Image: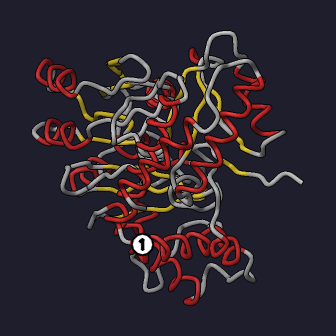
Amino acid sequence: MIKKYLMTPGPTQIPPEVLLAGAQPIVHHRTAAYSAIFSRVLENLKHVYQTENDVLCFTSSGTGAMESAVVNLLSPGDEVLIASCGKFGERWRDLAGVYGLVHDYLEFEWGRPVEPEDIEKALRSSANYKAVFVTHSETSTGAVNDMQAIGAIVEDSDAVLVADSISGMGSAELKTDAWQVDVVVAGSQKALMTPPGLAFASVSDKAWAMAERSKLPKYYFDWRKARKALAAADPQTPYTPAVSLIAGLDAALALIREEGLEKLFHRHRVMGRACREAVKAMGLELFSPDDDRSSSVTAVRVPEKIDDKQLRRLTRDKYGVQLAGGQGPISGKIFRVGHCGYYNYSDIVVALSAMELALRELGFQVDPGAGTARAEQIFGEEGI
């Protein structure tokens, strides 16, 4: 028997309480009983987002919420600024291209965060930008951008700041209101500990004002329809929601409330640090920044003469640990360890053990227990 550990940055492991909630009999989505659950979910999402703004909910992947931000904020021919440092920063560029937006693209080295000063320089050079798009937590590399600094820069302009926090929300802290982030999109399947299929967008007053002027075509993702449905006596969504996923998310957010945000973010910071320090102790090289903000995923360079697919196949099929590979131009060059959501020290130790065993089997020299010992030392120091 092989006990399986899902150690990817999404989908992530699901708590039993969430699975059980999602397995309950279906509640009809046009009833007061469902609206009570949905209202609680929205309030708890605001808590995790650290916002008083509206949080809209869609039945889609996180990319659906990204697309909703583009079509609800902008009009054909609008100019936007995109700052990218990985695969999901590129997604903002792709969406802008599909909808005919004029976009300036600031591209930074994969594995390194965006430089806020470059965004400031671009905003000073043109007053025509309607929006600035950035990735908060770049899932493809483990880099986390300084949203506080970027928010302070964009807040002084007429543009709205839109952040993809799909792998960051609930693991890499983002203070939506305090850091002046106008729109934050997220998804259910990462640190929010729920199966894939739900996406969210918080919308500031500044963003709502722009949405009222938007002329890009929209139907299912129309924010105004969503806000009208939320304002009903029994809050709901314009179209049929994923009822069982909402029930599961309700349970997941209750667990987050119980843990408390301070402990939640501390746990993720410690897991990230332990994983990074363990990787270095094993003689491997980090691809993701050695930065405590990188609390959702650790990206590791594949050693020379080691085949990435063979390594991940071995950890999965023999040792039960599913890791993620690289994407785009770094496919085959890195592997990624996810630790956002329903994870603690035991999951990290198991993943590191599997990595050590597989690497030794493939001929890489690593002392038994080198990584796990370093991780245990970090856990002992930090106490989670």
Q: Nearer the viewer, residue 74 or 170?
A: 170
Rendered image coloring scheme: secondary structure
Amino acid type assigned to the residue bearing label 1 in the image: Glu
Q: Residue at x 33, y 27 (%)?
A: 113
Quadrant containing the N terminus in the rendered view: bottom right
Q: Residue furthest bottom?
A: 32
Quarter placement of the C terminus: bottom left
* In the image, residue 347 above or below residue 128: below
Which residue: 60% across, 46% down?
10
* Whole-percent x, y for residue 317 in the image: 83, 39
Q: Which residue is mark 1?
A: 259
Q: State the residue in front, 297 or 77.
A: 297
The image quadrant that residue 343 belongs to is bottom right
Instruction: Say few, some or many: other residues with alpha carbon within 10 Å of mark 1 (under 14 / 14 to 19 / 20 or more).
Output: few
Q: Secondary structure at mark 1?
A: helix
Give the residue displayed 26% in from the left and 37% down from the top: 146
In the depicted structure, whether residue 218 falls above or below residue 42: above
Q: Would you say residue 68 is visible in this rendering?
A: no
Q: Nearer the viewer, residue 279 or 261?
A: 279
325 sits left or right of 210 in the view: right
Residue 285 percent coordinates (x, y): 49, 21
Q: Residue furthest right?
A: 1
Q: Quadrant of residue 309?
A: top right
How many numbered callouts? 1
Q: Is residue 206 visible?
A: yes
Rendering coords of residue 47 (x, y %): 34, 69
Left or right relative to 282: residue 377: left
